Image (spheres, grey):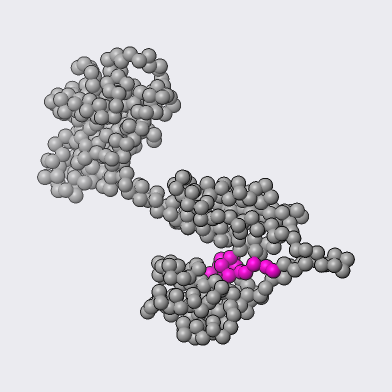
Amino acid sequence: MVRLTNEHILVIGDRERRMQTSVASALPAASVTSVQSVFDALAELHAGVYSGVLVNVDPLESRPDAATRALREASGEARLVVYSDPSREPLSRTLLEHGADDYVIAPAEARDLQQLLAIPAVREPDPVDGVDTAPPIDAIQPLLELPMTDIVLSAMLEHPQQAIKHAVQAIHERVAPMIQLTLTPAGEPIPVSTDDRAVITNELRNGENHPVGTLVLELPRPVDELSAQHTLGRIAQVLAKMGQIDDRQARLQKLAITDDLTGVYNARYFKHFLARILEKARTRRFPVTLFLFDLDNFKKYNDTFGHGVGDEILKQTASLMKRCSRDHDLVARISGDEFAVVFWEKEGPRQVFDGIQPASRLPSTPLIIADRFRKLLGNRDFNEFSLLGASGKGVLTISGGMSVYPYDAQTADDMIRAADKALMFGAKKGGKNSIYLVGGDEDAALGASD
């Protein structure tokens, strides 16, 4: 037999009684006391025993850190939870550093309050033939004994941006086979409880509040499902915060590798990617083509139309190159009006290299893409650069140079030098509006005679 100890909840600063209504819905057996000020709350806490304390950030706003610490000390073993409307969430979060156990956004969902405030059940012996038997071991005990801090930190350090997935796997491995903990993707079927096993679920969301999936906990019966729900809820909260950190890391990483004007990759990431893809090409034996290009006479556009229009030209140029390229090719702005494109064969080698380096042989796809891009850029009927007006429309051209691994160079630096040489001493000196290939003859220059 299971006896649930009644919760005694103290609610502070709930002038519109919305939080009391939420508590009554979440914990109908709970006894709720409401006060308006921190001073009244401190007096109440010294006079009675409470299992949970809910405090609005509004009464704390003048001295939130000191008030929270005072409430923490007076609350004893009770859970101290801050609540606020969404606009005050940053303040609520900071109070975790001063003694609050958690925070919740008002109006609070019943399930959230159950997870935050429900206290574990107390088991009493089941009578058998008039004799009390020893209480069974609670099925959730292995979960309560997990070193969650170690599991979380290991997942975040070893698997950044996939920390939630690996943390769930690590927890599962420690408690299986009696307990099963899985993360079911959104939209997939979820197991149902049976006579032998209880299924407890908790929806998991990421830092953007988008559903990640459902956390599914399967336990053998007998089990106190309320305690299991509370335990799963605490695990879900930890995982959700990991998701927020993952999202923040992903945003910071994107900022670190992206050109803020054009949205394509920046020079730092371009060099990193080129070196990595060459390592892959050596193992899998496929060609890699580097295309460097810049806008002819770009300074004239800035001087004639202004830097705002010049920036727009750079953005539209990057966008057009992205649309001309394949999804797996890399487009980067490496300085000013200079761009780089790395073409590589995702499907593997078209030919097997025998270690001999013949004259430059350019795979056909990068050549077709680059020349199509060059022609679209200078097409008078192309509307992408209508912002230049009648006098400027259709006069935008590029000059480019190409080098190919393994024929023209073996390293990233050598490929860049070779392509840059073709750009400067081939395309530029050959009359601009053209693309030159390393080691090519006159037929290898595209566009010079268009």
- Count of numbered labels shown in the rendering: 0
Relative placement, left or right, of 434 versus 347 is left
**Considering only vertical position in the picture, is 363 above or below 251?**
above
Image quarter for residue 363?
A: top left
Relative placement, left or right, of 159 versus 225 is left
Q: Position of residue 239 (x, y in %)?
A: 51, 55
- Residue at far right of view: 129
Residue 181 forms part of the magenta stretch: no
Q: Position of residue 229 (x, y in %)?
A: 63, 61
**Considering only vertical position in the picture, is 387 above or below 128?**
above
Q: Which residues are magenta?
A: 108-122
Q: Depth check: 29 or 399 in front?
A: 29
State the quadrant of the C terminus: top left
Q: Position of residue 130 (x, y in %)?
A: 87, 69
Q: Depth check: 323 or 151 in front?
A: 151
Residue drawn at 42 percent across, 24 percent down? 284
Residue drawn at 67 percent across, 47 percent down? 177
State the quadrant of the N terminus: bottom right
Q: Position of residue 77 (x, y in %)?
A: 56, 73
Camera sees residue 438 = yes
Residue drawn at 40 percent across, 74 percent down? 65
Q: Depth check: 105 or 371 in front?
A: 105
**Considering only vertical position in the picture, is 275 above or below 362?**
below
Camera sees residue 370 = no
Residue drawn at 19 percent across, 47 percent down? 309
**Considering only vertical position in the picture, is 246 above or below 373?**
below
Image quarter for residue 325?
A: top left
